[in-house]
Image: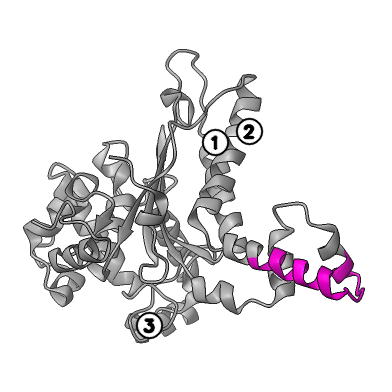
Amino acid sequence: MTRARKKLIDLASISYYHLISRCVRRAFLCGDDKYTGKNFDHRREWLVERIKLLSSVFAIEVAAYAIMSNHYHLVVNVNRRQALDWSDDEVIKRWYQLYNGHFLVDRHLKGEQLDKPSLLFFNEIIAKWRERLYDISWYMKNLNEYIAREANKEDNCTGKYWEGRYKSQALLDETAVLSCMAYVDLNPIRANIADTLEDSDFTSIQERIAHFKAFTTDTVKANKLLKQKDNIQHESQPAQLKPFGGNHIKHTIPFALLDYIELVDWSGRHIDPKKKGHINKTMPKVLLTLNIEEAQWLESIQRFRQQYSNFAGSKQRLKQQAASNDVKWYKGAG
């Protein structure tokens, strides 16, 4: 049953979300179209570029992404507190990067003194824009409408481009965030279109690995990193993605970057046992730290979408969320 979006997104208590959009013309989002022989991989670049632009404007950071042939996945973190702390001028500057302004706002920017009624209306405008700049629905609307317009223009057609409204899963705890990110990053390997993380085109894990390798070619920086393995500096990570850091570093994903790469690589080798390369029998550090069983983890990163519905997390967190939303049960609660 379709649920109202306000019942699925609660920014006061949940900041991480898994978002998915699927193309209605399934073969024409990206990749090769078997009917026309055209290749549409450049549309994946459109999506990645647009996602990063929007994350530089909205108070919404991207933790993971995977752009597939007919759909895409995002794991985002909504920083509501950041948006509420922005000055009025900061809100205006960000809004004007995407939309036309308002004549009252233009007068404010010119330094004009607004009378009391105009000032009240001005404050209402800024409050509305501020709220939209941490709103997932506005983020997705801006992303999907832009891609639809560009694709329709290229195809010389009109009509729906996306299958329907985007789907969302609220990630209720650290384990849900971690397993969902790995699920997203492993999409090309599960789909048998990539053999390694480095070959997983248009994924956040490929971008993180490439950026880290480029950064560590500098011997001085590499030596510094080796001494601080659990506290990888932000410079070693892509600026447009939410950085890994750990629980002791504010505004980061609460795990170390190298531990996450090790975990995803280990998981990918278990998904495809025929894949070349040695499978380390030792469980990755993150699974031991979070006390996650191997079988439970591998089931989650292969069937995350089927395992949960609109909310993902431990049985206890799912029961708590169900109670707070005045429902009896959520899928995955047992």
The answer to which image quadrant residue 265 occupies is bottom left
170 or 54: nearer the viewer = 170
> Which element is circle 3 on?
helix
Magenta range is 107-127
Residue 120 is one of the magenta-drawn residues:
yes
Is residue 50 rendered to the left or right of residue 174? right
Please state the horizontal and vertical placement of residue 177, each as a whole percent of the image.
30, 63
Mark 1, secondary structure of its residue:
helix
Residue 285 in the image: state x and y as whole percent. Answer: 18, 73
Q: Is residue 218 visible?
A: no
Q: CA distance from mark 2 to mark 1?
A: 9 Å
Name the image quarter holding the C terminus.
bottom left
What residue is drawn where x is 43% and y is 84%? 224
The mark that comes first in sequence, 1 or 3, is 1
Q: Earlier in the sequence, mark 3 or mark 2?
A: 2
Report which residue position mark 3 lands on. 231
Residue 85 in picture, x, y percent from top left:
59, 79
Front disc: 1 or 3? 1
Kindly report the distance in space between the C-alpha atoms of the residues bearing marks 1 and 3.
35 Å
Say which of 38 and 97 sits in front.
97
> Where residue 88 sits in the image (x, y, percent)?
71, 74
In the picture, the disc for residue 150 is 2
Say which quadrant the N terminus sits in: top left
Decide if residue 307 is on the left or right side of residue 222. left
* Residues packed near mark 1 inside 10 Å, few (<14), some (14 to 19) or many (20 plus): some
Looking at the rendered structure, the kind of residue marked 3 is: Asn
Tell me the amino acid under the disc marked 2. Glu
Q: Earlier in the sequence, mark 2 or mark 1?
A: 1
